[in-house]
Image: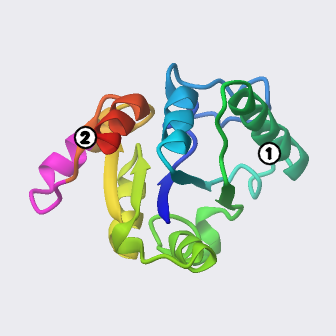
Amino acid sequence: MKLIVLDRDGVINHDSDAYIKSKEEWVPIEGSLEAIARLNHGGYTVVVASNQSGLARGYFDIEALAAMHKKMDDMLTKIGGRVDAIFYCPHAPADACDCRKPKPGMLLDIGQRFNVSLKDVVFIGDSVTDIKAASNARAQAVLVRTGKGVRAEKILQAESNVSVPVYDDLAAAVTAILK
């Protein structure tokens, strides 16, 4: 099985420091949905792994989150794409759970559910937290410059021991992966 894991906010859809709280606020980044469809057509199982602390903070409820994901699924279906599973952490940072990135719990759960070794799995994210989660789970990290990616790239460059492939956006990362 070829499995790829994507962060959501900042990778698939535009992010906001005020959180994405409704399906109306959930707006895909240009080319991201087409990139997911290209992964599907390339034989990849696509999974989303996303911290969603807005739930714990009371910014939105589970129905609003489900509506955002339905919007994404509906838009993907129209172009022949799909996300095979969505994993999310509903906890606040203070909850000290094992699933909140940068901890590896969510990615380890994905590996177990799909019965794959994470060393063969690419995780595409836009934040230092995503890159550290991939490293902590022993997955292959890829950074995109959308969302928080430009800031993350500068931080990672300052940490000389961290080197990951960097692409302008999900579409560019997928093009490289599918080569």
Q: Is residue 9 left or right of residue 141?
A: right
- Image location (x, y in percent) of residue 159: 15, 56
Q: Is residue 123 left or right of residue 76?
A: left
Q: Is 173 placed above or below 2 here?
A: above
- Image location (x, y in percent) of residue 82: 67, 42
Per the image, label 2 sits on a secondary structure element best described as strand
Q: Which residue is mark 1?
A: 65
Q: Which mark is residue 162?
A: none
Q: Is 118 placed above or below 23 here?
A: below
Q: Nearer the viewer, residue 170 or 59?
A: 170
Q: Does the segment drawn in magenta span residue 46?
A: no
* Image quadrant assignment for residue 131: bottom left
Quarter of the picture containing the C terminus is top left
Mark 1 residue type: Leu
- Image location (x, y in percent) of residue 30: 51, 19
Per the image, label 1 sits on a secondary structure element best described as helix
Distance (Cα) linking label 2 and label 1? 29 Å
Circle nearer the viewer, 2 or 1: 2
Q: Residue furthest right?
A: 63
Q: Which residue is mark 2?
A: 166
Label 1: few (<14), some or many (≥20) within 10 Å?
Answer: some
Which segment did they paint magenta?
153-163
